[in-house]
Amino acid sequence: MADGPGIEILPLGREGEEELFSAYARLVEDEEGFPHAAPLSFEEFYDYWVAHTTAVLAARREGRLVGAYYLKPNFVGRAAHIANAGYFVVREERGNGIGRLLVLDSIARAPGLGFDALQFNLVFSSNPARRLYEELGFEVIGRIPRAVGGEDALIYWRELS
């Protein structure tokens, strides 16, 4: 599926896992947006990003990874209709609208995967993506004081119907 100027967002295949791990591990090492501690092992990455997900999508420009996201149930059982998602854009591609494409793609795909709402559990208060989330109709439904490194985190939610 072509999603933007030169960007394709497609399901991640096994062949893309190492590339995604390398990009995500760099993000973790730089303490950008996710709470994992560096150094991140491939096993930790795989457990979080691949093993328990419903879908993992990679954004590519000319075959090169520029961003990714996952969708998975936020809860189990009767509450599994609420999805959780995690997104990232590689540093060199930020500010080019790729994050918006990823979030819009997840909103479009989630209902077909059985989800009717989307929740983000740990959005740091300093995260510049907050403006995008709010612009796309997500609302803050909670705050976690001093979640990581003394910084507050917000919980965002949006119905998908």
Image (cartoon, rainbow, N blue to C red):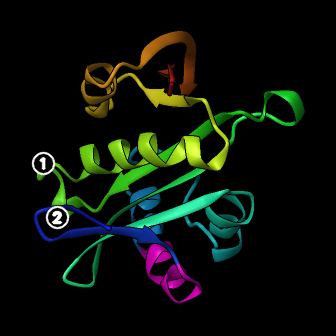
**What are the residue bounds of the magenta stretch?**
13-22
Residue 158 left/right relative to 74: left
Regarding mark 1 in the picture, which secondary structure is present there?
loop
- Residue 69 is situated, as x and y percent measured from the top left of the image, at 46, 55
Q: Quadrant of the N terminus?
A: bottom left
Residue 92 left/right relative to 119: left
For the residue carrying disc 2, how many other residues have a C-alpha within 10 Å: few (<14), some (14-19), or many (20+)? few
Q: In which quarter of the image is residue 125?
A: top left
Identify whether 26 is placed above or below 158.
Answer: below
Give the labeled residue for mark 2: 92
Residue 48 left/right relative to 30: right
- Callout 2 amino acid: Glu
Residue 72 shows in the view: no
Residue drawn at 49 percent across, 49 percent down: 109
Give the labeled residue for mark 1: 95
Identify whether 13 is placed above or below 59.
Answer: below
- Residue 126 is situated, as x and y percent measured from the top left of the image, at 32, 26
Residue drawn at 29 percent across, 33 percent down: 129
Residue 97 left/right relative to 110: left
Residue 13 shows in the view: yes
The rendered magenta stretch, by its main secondary structure, is classed as helix
In front: 81, or 73? 81
- Callout 1 amino acid: Gly
